[in-house]
Structure formats: structure tokens, C-alpha cells
Amino acid sequence: MTYNKTDTPRLRQYLPDAFKTLLPGIAVLCLLLAAHYKITLDQESDLILQKAQATTELTHQMMDTRLREMTSDAHILADHVSSVGLESPLARDLTGYFLRFASHKPAYAQLRYIDASGREVVRINNVGGLVAVPPGRLQNKSGRYYFQQGMTLNSGEVYISPFDLNVEQGRVEENNPTLRVAAAVRQGNKVRGIVVLNLNGAELFEQVWGNAAIAADAIALLSSNGFSLIRPQAETNRVTFSNTNPLAEKSPDLWQKINQTPLGQILFKNSFFSFSSLDVDQAIGNNQWKIFTILNEGALRQVNMQFAYTNLPLYGLIALMIIGISILHARHQYRHQQVQEHNAYERSFRHLLEEIELAAVSLDRDGRIRFCNDHFLALTGYQRSEVDGQNWLQMFIPKQYQLGDSKQINETFSGQRVAAPYQGNILTREQASLTLAWTCTLQQNSDGFVEQISLVGEDITARLEAEQEIRLLTQAVEQSANTVMMTNTQGGITYVNPAFCNLTGYRPEEVLGRNPSFLKSGYTSDDQYLELWQLLRKGEIWQGEFHNRKKSGELFWESVVISPVRDSQGKTLAYIAVKQDVTEEKRLQVELEQETKERVRNEQLAAVGRMANMVAHDLRNPLSSIKVGLQMTSRKPDLDSGSRELCQISLDQIRHMEGILEDMLTYARPDELRQEWLSINKLLEQVVMGQLRLIQDRNVFIDQDFDNNLPRIYADPVKLRQAIQNLVVNAIQAAEANESQIARVALKTRLLFSDQGHKLEIAISNNGSTIDPCICDKVFEPFFTTKAKGTGLGLAIVQRIIQQHTGQVRLEPMAESGTRAVVLLPAEIIAEVVKEEMQA
């Protein structure tokens, strides 16, 4: 039988076998692509929603602060107008008072007082300069909606208008969006007019655009009577006003979801909506607002495009590799099948070589081919007539291997080399290189002379290529930046890649066979692990986040996708987890939240500062005059004792008011620290000595438990003493005595060691009433107080001073009775030791 070139396998013959390998490979690749896309889309969507939420919260805080400030200012002006008296000569000074007030409020475009007839009495314009409008240009506003609403206000209420365009002399000002707040001026129970504040909406909108944490498509302000749509990216018509709710008209389902929830985030038709609600107390009109940030489908489209540009070329290359491997494997399978069929036919003709499913070639001493089986011809693509008698080296061995193979053949014939298996390359008719594993057999005559060498070889080209592909895939996993872990069905770890070792600090031999639960930090709930195993046992994919612990004890976050690995019958063989370290993303999220809180707190401090400056300016001089007058009166020799006692009580109250003003200024304008090295124990002893009189008056026992080995700290002694003295005085005043105990205050210092470094702890406790846990944080808010007499700034100032020293302060209830104040300060031990060595 001859085996000619027409028997060579064609593509159409082994294509069905190729699909058997190709389809599972493409399916796995599509699964990986879908998982990769899902993880990337979820991460990018979460980041976009976080930025949109930050923008919404900033806008909410800005609107809340501005509306409450306008409400307060409207009440102040209304009370002033009412106290001056509309019929007295002092009413002529209203214009001057309004001018002074407007000089501190640049955000107000207009300040007006309108009498009960609707006639403007005072109007201050603050656009392009502070100007009082002359009486001849004052207008009648009786027909305006805000005047009619303001005249119906109850005591303590204000009216808030929607955003609209200002109307001046009957002309609509297109570029002057305005928000108005009105308060009624009362004399007794009768409304004698209203005070109206016009907010410069353009300035407010510019602040909204400037503070946005993301390039939003729109920021909407929606009230019950109006809709304002701010488009930061538009070059013209950046602000749109409407008397209706376009969102409710176009998307009623979306509006129902937003309107029923105070705050949240919604992905609706590929658009992101982040929203919050704002309610203004003691107000009518537009006292309820919905504030939301809108990002259209372009945000998701950009994420999809970025993912496609970054990853599709790589996945396309992998797909081509899978196709090539499938074709090569199918071709090898087909050839193997053809060899089996050919050998089955040839067994009846040959008793030795024809039963071997391998290539067989016999060479004489000159290196010429004396025999080759059909399998060899099939591999090379030649016909028998073209091969018989030809030189083996010149016809089949690549040039770079001819010299070595020639030497090997000669040494084998001469007996210098023992015939042994080896791998060699041969060329096909198409000059393609094949790798065969040869076994060499010597054929001798009766005299023992070696006449021929028979080579029996197996084509291992496809196997080597497949092994190379496996090595490449293994290297891809080994060199992947993502953590890869594989476990058996009982949860024992069977494989981890180097990225896992680099991230966790564990060596492979330390984790193989162990359950991944040894990485648990305790911050991931048991319910999450229960859900994970329920999904995996169902054969489904689980994805989520773990808060794990490294070998060093350091905590880290991982985004995880865990998939079951199944055989062809669908039986789960193992589980594979692909994890990505997202610790940095979590840290950035926390930093963003902290920056947002700090920005809001600074805005609140600025408001307190402006109020403190105004109050101090308007009250200090009158208080000083009253104080001097009372002092002079109390010194008159003919003053009776009752009047003298009344003067003394009045002086005490004035001193109390001066203390309030001083606390407000101290909180609003903190001085810079003047730090030096000091001993905290000595500072506490000085505080106690300074309060001996108060301690004796209240009969309080002071218990001191100081650690004598504390390092000195670098701090401002004056400010730190002021903060600690405030806490000590509060503890002395709160200490209580009863039948079983005396009034007691305990002072304790110690050094703490934590992951954040060394901390110096100061604990000040008393045995008085236990603080309500619900107000432990609220007591540090400005103007919050539980005392009948006080400003509510004492603990706020304490917290400010401790935070200036990068420390922490908290109040906590004690187990049985009493309250404890704990102060944590950083202990600069190394710096102190270096300083002492330099001094020595």
C-alpha cells in the first residue's frame, strides 16, 4: 500500500474536531471578559456615584447654610426695624443701619424694608457697589407675590421664594437669578411691613460650579413652586428656570423614587442621579428643596469605550491563540486517527513496523533511506518513490542540525555511541519543521556488522506547542498583578500565585492546604461568608469585597470574584478566586469624605466668625459704656444698699456677657500654636493648684494617678492648659456627694501603644451624674449646652485646641456612675530622646 499526498488531512476534515476544543475555550474567554468588564464597570460606576454624591452633599450644605443665614439675617433686620419704632425719629436711621448690615453681607443683591402699603421705605442695592436708593426712586411692590406672602407670615416665620429672574422697573433682568427671603415686621400683633433679602443667584451658582467634585451634566434645585437646572458644562443658558417640575412630567417613575426617599443614588436609563432633601424650619413657601446631581449616559459610554480600548486587543489576541491551538490540536488528533486506521490496514502486510503507530525510517551506512513506513510519509508529505534512496540529512534534516546528526549517525555505526532515544527535527515537503522523539535500533548481519539503523519516532510537535501554550498561560497567571487562589471543594488552598505572596506576606508553603479563613480580619460579617458558600455550592459565581489581614497584621481590602471549576459533566472540581487589592481606592474614598466634612466645618466656622465679629462690634462698646456707668453709680456715697446690690448684680451679668463674647471670638479666630517641650504631669498639677479655691468651696477630693515615666510632649502650654482646665472645672462642678461617698474627681495619665504610634492618655473622671450616651458627640458642637447658664462653646474650644495638637478628645459614661473625659495626644518620644542627647 502506498500513502500519497492525497491522504494528507485537509482543513475541512478536522474542522469539526477543532470546534470541540475551540468552543469551550472561547466560552471560558468570554466568561473572563464578562467578569473583567463587570468588575471594571462596578468600580467605575461606584467611583462616579461617590463623586456625584459628594457634589450633591456640597450643594446641599451650601444651600442649607445660605438659607439658614438668610433666615437669621431677615429676623435680625425685622427685629431691628420693629425695635426702632416706625413712628419715632430713629426710623430715619434705618438706611444707615441697612447699609452697615449690607457691608458685611456681599452675597445679598438687595436689602429692603417695605411698609404695610407695599411701598419701599428702604432699599439697598449691592450690585457693582453698595448704594442706598434715593426716596424718589423707591417703588411700590404691593402687587408682587413675595410681598403678599410676607404680609401673611406668623410670628417667627419667614417666606422663601423660588429662584426666578429679578424684575426692575417692569423689566426682566435676564442675567440676574434671584432668591428672596422675607420676614414680617411686627408691632404687637399687627404686621407693619416686611423685610426682604435678595440673594445674588449668579454668585451662588458660580460657587456650586466651582465646588463640584465631578464634571456633572446638571445640578438641579427643585422646590414646591419652581425648578432650577444648573448646567456647568454649557457655554450659554447655564441656568434654566421653570414653574413646573419637568423631571416629574418626563419621568414620573424616576421622580416617584426620588420624591419618596430623603437622599440616595439611582441609576436610571444609563443616567446617574444623586439626590438629597433640604427642609428649612419655621419657613413657608419654598421651604422644602430637592437637590440632585445628574450625569447622563455619556459617563457609562466613556467607561465602556475606555474598557474596549484597553482590553479588547488583548482578549482578541488570546482568542486568536485559542483558535490556533484548537486547529493544531484537532489536526494532531486527526493525524493520530489516520495513523491508527493506516496501521490497522497495514498489519496484514507487515509483522513488525506496520503495527507501530509511529514513523519508521531505515538508513544505511551512507545515510540513505532504505525503508520508510507510510506514517512517516504522511508526516512529511512525500510519496514513497520520492523518498527511497535519498540522502536522509540533505532531504529531511534542517541545515543547522545536519552536522550534528551526521556525526551522531557515524558514531553509532562505528560503535562509538550507544543507540539511545533522542529528539530531532525534520522538514516536511512544505519545509515545515516537525519535532519527533526518535528511538534508534541497530540492524546487524550474521557477522554482527551493523548494516542499517532503524529510527522509530513519534511526532511530538503539537504536544510541545500545547505544553508551550500551557507554560505561557501559567506564566500569565504567575506574573499577573491580581491575586489568584485555587482551593479544592473542601476549601483547602491548592495554589496561590506570586501576587498573593507579595500582597499578604505569606510563602506558598505556609498557606497550601489551609482554609482561606486564616486571612479573616473579623471585619467581614459571617452572613457574607454564608452567602458566598451558598452561591458556590449552587455552581454560581460570587463577587464582593473582603477586609483581610496580612501576615504582618496590616489590614487591606480586596475586590474578589470566585468561580467554580467544573468538569465536562458539570461536577465542581475546585474553586478559583481572582482578587484585586482595592485598599488605595478605599483610602481615597475615606480621604474624600474627610475633606468634604472639613470643608463643611470650615464654612460653619466662617459663619460663626462673621457672626462673632458682628456681635462683638455691636455689643462691646455699649456694654463698656453700661459697665462704666454702673461702676460710677455704685461708688456714689449716698447710694442706698438695695441700689448698690442691684448695681453689683448688673455688673456681674455684664461680666458674664463679656465672657460670652470672648468665648465666641476665641472659637471663631483660633490663634496659632506656640509650642515647646513640656511635662503633662506638671501641667496637670498647675491646673489643680489654680483651682484650689473652687475645690475647697465644693469640698471635692482630687485623686491623682500620674505615670512618672511619661515622655514630654511638644505643645502650646497656654492653650493646652486652657483646654485641660476647662475639663477639670467641668469635672469638679459635676462631682456629687451622697451618704455613701464624697464628691470625687480622678486625674490619670498613662502611655498607650497602638498601630498609629505612641499616644499619651489623660483621663479626667467624676462621680456625678452619668452623661447621656446620645449626646457624647453633640456636646462638642458650637452653642450646644446642657447648663442653664453658659455659651455652649467651652467644649467646642477644648476640641479645637486638642485637634490643633493633632489629638482627640471624647466624653464617655462610666460603668456605675459619673462621666469620664479622655484626651489622647501624640507622644514624640524619639524627638525627645534626640533632643536630650544633643543637650547632653
Image (cartoon, grey):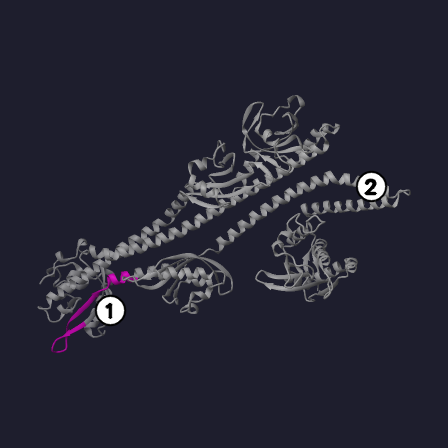
Give residue 493's quadrant in the image: bottom left
| Residue 308 position within the rendered picture, expressed as x and y whole percent measured from the top left | 37, 47
Q: Which label was assigned to residue 775?
A: none
| Residue 229 position within the rendered picture, expressed as x and y whole percent measured from the top left | 49, 35
Check the image and report above or below for 794 versus 332.
above
- Residue occupying the point 59% across, 38% down: 283
SS for callout 2: helix
Q: CA separation, marks 1 and 2?
A: 115 Å
Q: Which label was assigned to residue 422?
A: 1
Give left or right: position of 270 versus 84. left
Report the amino acid beneath label 1: Tyr
SS for callout 1: strand
Q: Nearer the viewer, mark 1 or mark 2?
A: 2
Give left or right: position of 233 versus 650. left
Write the start and end of the magenta stretch as one range: 441-467
Residue 334 colored in magenta in the image: no
Q: Which residue is mark 2?
A: 628
> Does the rendering let one see residue 431?
no
Q: Residue furthest front?
A: 189
Check the image and report above or below for 28 versus 241.
below
> Does the rendering let one see residue 270?
yes
Q: Nearer the viewer, residue 480 or 124?
A: 124
Give left or right: position of 363 versus 582. left
Q: Nearer the viewer, residue 51 or 59?
A: 59
Q: Are marks 1 and 2 in contact (CB under 8 Å)?
A: no
Report the amino acid beneath label 2: Val
Q: Quadrant of the C terminus?
A: bottom right
Tell which circle, 1 or 2, labels the residue nearer the N-terminal end: 1
Q: Residue furthest right?
A: 638
